[in-house]
Image (tube, helix red, strand yellow):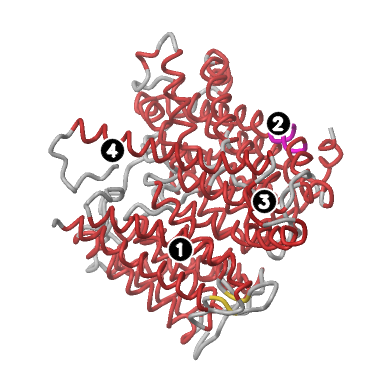
Amino acid sequence: MEFLQYFGGVFEPLSFALLVFGTVGGLILGATPGLSPTMAVALLIPFTFQLQPTQGLILLGAAYTATVAGGAVSAILLKIPGAPANIATAIDGHKMAQAGHGTRALHVSFLASGVGGVIGVLLLIFLTPVLAKWALAFGPSHLFWMAILGVTIIGSLDSKSFVKGLLSGCLGFWLSMIGYDDIQGAQRFIFHDSLTGGVNVIAALIGIFAIPQVIEMFANGRQSAVVKAVTVQKQSLIDSVKLLFQNIRALSIGTVIGSVVGLIPGVGGQIAGLVAYDQSRKFSKTGHKFGTGHPEGVIAAESANNAMVGPSLVPLLTLSIPGSPTAAVLLGGLLIHGIFPGSDLFENHPQVAWTFINSMLIGQLLMVIFGIWIASYAARVAQVPSSIMAACVLVLALFGSYSVQQSMGDVYIMATLGIAMYFLEKFGFSAAPLVLGLILGPIAESNFVQGSMIANAVSSPSHYFLTGSLNLLLIALVIASVAYSFIMTRREAKAIKRSTPTASDDAVTS
Amino acid sequence: MNSLRVQHLLPAILVLLLATTVTYLSFIREPASAFLFPRLVAVVMLSLAVWNFIRAARGLARVGNGISLDTLLKILPGLLVMVVYLFWAAKYFGFYLASFVAFFILFTLYDPASHKALRSWMVRLIVTLCFMLVIFCLFNLLLQVQTPRGIFL
């Protein structure tokens, strides 16, 4: 119950103000189609430099929680999911809104998000210290394999093509090696003056997540028709609470599935929402009503995608392996403040770790309160034309990436990576493994070098890295994650071939 | 060979070239111990890049829709403004002036409102001014970030 000692930190004036600001801002950003939670958190990182690490993390954590939940507003009122995690919410949520139950849909969406979110954070609170203590037994070889595992899991599970996913991970590793070698000071891959200091993680994150979204908005052209939001009338909150508890089965299924999915590195909220929606439909007595504006659909999807948030931070805070792309950005935010996840975080910075985790718990409650309060207003923000959004994000990306080190080199890196990522994504390469490779690259390399030194002193490198039960378990997991993805890709390709015997090269899935 | 196959081949070739360069540099540069990890990564990257290239050449790389000519034409003006703004104008003219101009141009380029009506031009100008005011307050006054002033601001 160590976490109880640090609750006071959340209620310090500046910390609490940041929590409220992050929650309200996150809800508004989340409600804006095209602004993903990952991008919102990446753009916020530069604003945390002037803050204490704890306060910076509170802001980022609140934004993460609220953007995931805020995406439900545009999903319900506009049928445009604010984030991929809200795809399942749009199915029944928008139908409810069209039938005149928009406010009810928003109420149950935020209430379900709150319940799922609180349980998810409780899991984070109780699982993290156990895993962190377990991580103490890890030596350099284990940490090396953990870093490799992080990239292979996200590279193979988060990508539609596992070859391109793993290749993206390798590109991330390579980017992390640019600059001067930490141990010998050797120059590595410095093709331009801007690369002398290496690739700054924050500038790269902003570029990789913000610039492709800006270009995607350009691709909409001069959109003449702004999607009209469904108008909402006032409805009783108490009735919505009753409705939530009448659908306790959907709430439980969503929460359990979201929590489990969150714990698996690389599997994001989008999958949590869709799997929970599907399972809820299967277990429901009124499954035939799903898709027609059934509250169970909204409750299952929203409880799942917010229940995923807390557990997705468990592998991040204990083993440095983010459970989702947004968690990968949060890892960047931690590292920039000189805080390394794992046992060190809980042993040497318990105040930072526990205040941050506690703030996420309080943040869930604030998210429900503010979500219900501002939901109908947030829909107006969702109608901001993409021409303005694109320009705003671009300017913020410039100022944000520059302010990291006050260096134009970071701006050039941000722009180059962002533009390249847009085109790479069009051909099946993924941002998440690339970012993870970039973040985990230094961890993998330093442990590889340390391990090699130990190995040369006591045995051979192959013996040191390839033997021992934990090493073998991690290697088996690396192989299993790649093999699983390989088999699934082959199976999908065969299924497509069977369904379309004359499949042309134009097929877009494999 | 259809256009999507060619489109998939292009990034596959570029990634293969990059992987080959990285591998080559990793193995010729000294001291060898500083390039131990890069060599390991480079070999894996090259193997995957070769695999990816073979798949693309055989028309098996099907993930991703590629880019249609229509999309390319839509993004091209914005992309040009972005490149000029980020790589040159921001430093040359100063962040605030360059951002003001870039914001206004992008807003105008992609704004669905009429380009003939005076009112829509006024709206664009006011929105741009308001946004830049927020950015100035946030970065200059609150965060005190010293941005390049260039020849102006």
Spatial separation of the CA atoms under disc 1 and disc 4: 40 Å
Q: Secondary structure at mark 2?
A: helix
What is the quadrant of residue B56 in the picture? bottom left
Three-letter code for the amino acid on which mark 1 is drawn: Cys
Mark seen at residue A122: 2
**Residue A84: which quarter of the image?**
top left
Please state if A299 lies on the left or on the right of B146 as rendered.
left
Q: Which residue is mark 1?
A: A392
Circle 1/circle 4 CB separation < 8 Å: no
Q: CA distance from mark 3 to mark 4?
A: 39 Å
Chain where mark 1 sits: A
Q: What secondary structure is found at the residue carrying circle 4?
A: helix
Between disc 1 and disc 4, whose residue precedes?
Answer: 1
Q: Which residues are magenta?
A: A123-129
**Image location of residue A89, percent across then percent down:** 43, 31
Mark 4 highlights which residue? A493
Residue at position x 57%, y 25% in the image: A255
Q: Residue furthest right?
A: A5
